[in-house]
Image (cartoon, rainbow, N blue to C red):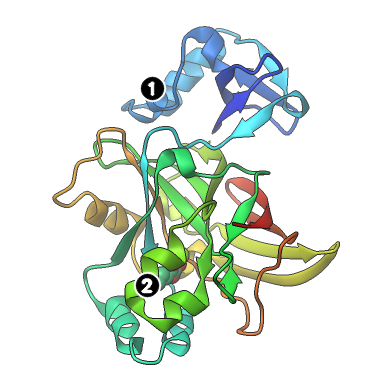
Amino acid sequence: MRLCRFQNSRNEVRIGLVRDDQTILDLTALGIERLSALLESEEPVRLLEDLVSKNPPSCRCAEVRLLTPVERQEVWAAGVTYLRSKKARMEESDFSASAYDRVYEADRPELFFKSLPEKVVASNEPVGIRKDARWNVPEPELVLVINSHGRIAGYSIGNDMSSRDIEGENTLYLPQAKVYHRSCAVGPVIRLGAAETEARTWKIELRVRRGGVIAFAGETSVGQIKRSLTELADYLFRSQVFPHGAVLLTGTGIVPPDDFSLQVGDEVAIHISGIGDLTNRVVQV
Ligand code: DO4
Ligand code: MG
């Protein structure tokens, strides 16, 4: 089951259940005002089945604008969770290479704050590259949507836009390399009802199109993540409270070659097989 937030032709924000490529069931017509009402439920799939049996009105996907499914959650990200990411980070940095090597092997994962919810970019909205960066990449990542009790309630797709020259110059610059205007995209849906074993079979694909031509394509599988998804969620909730739940990007396993950098106008398309497609065009910020 796939949930979304959308804006209808009367500019109202609604909660929907994506029925197929064509249709969305309007759950707000049945009193569901926020996704959190479903994500906080013990049994969201059962609750949704009940709602569907009440025949909510439907709208056509083509007539609505999909918003990011992030409502009031803080957005965090994990780093160096795939071997490919560890290698890339070690190569880009002169004197911090061992930090990446050590965190890949350590019990405690790298977790960093990525975005306020209101700054998250939806699918089909622009993502940014910094004016003061030379080497910019998308990071396509599986997203965990975690409720306030620390339970993984669903999954989405994220882009952890990053400036590799700033990050590589000094690890202490990581917040500037990672947290800036339009640096985080999440959406367009939340996939419910999948166990971790299923999520680990999903394929992640990245395509960057430049002037209609593929400038970079790569793929990996969620199963390549070194850590379990519940382990990442549990670490995030250690000595921490998230009254509105949290959203956690789980790290990238796709790294373009070192001579590749995003350009203004590029289209970044991320596909995760169990979820759908997140697509954004690049602007300078
Ligand atoms: O340590 C730098 C961040 C790494 C990251 O964002 C990733 O592996 O996805
Ligand atoms: Mg990342």
Quadrant assignment for the N terminus: top right
Residue 209 position (above or below residue 152): below
Residue found 44% across the figure and 81% down from its top: 168
Q: Which mark is residue 173?
A: 2
Is residue 134 visible to the viewer in this orientation of the structure?
Answer: yes
Side of 15 relative to 228 (left or right)? right
Residue found 31% across the figure and 33% down from its top: 244
Residue 202 position (above or below residue 120): below
Residue 20 position (above or below residue 93): above
Side of 237 relative to 62 (left or right)? left
- Quadrant of the rendered image containing residue 188: top right
Q: Position of residue 123 (x, y in %)?
A: 63, 44
Q: Which residue is mark 1?
A: 37
Q: Using the numbered discs, state the Cα–Cα distance from disc 2 to disc 1 in whole angstroms.
A: 37 Å
Is residue 225 visible to the viewer in this orientation of the structure?
Answer: no
Determine whether label 2 and label 1 are within 8 Å by CB: no
Considering only order in the chain, which callout, 1 or 2, is on the residue closer to the N terminus? Answer: 1
- Quadrant of the rendered image containing residue 154: top left
**Residue closest to the far bottom:** 94
Residue 194 position (above or below residue 25): below
Residue found 51% across the figure and 66% down from its top: 162
Residue 54 versus residue 143: which sits nearer the camera? 143
Q: Which mark is residue 84?
A: none
Q: Secondary structure at mark 1?
A: helix
Name the amino acid type tagged 1.
Ala
Crowding around mark 1 (Cα neighbors within 10 Å: few <14, some 14 to 19, many 20+) is few
Residue 90 versus residue 84: which sits nearer the camera? 90
Side of 7 relative to 196 (left or right)? right
Crowding around mark 2 (Cα neighbors within 10 Å: few <14, some 14 to 19, many 20+) is some
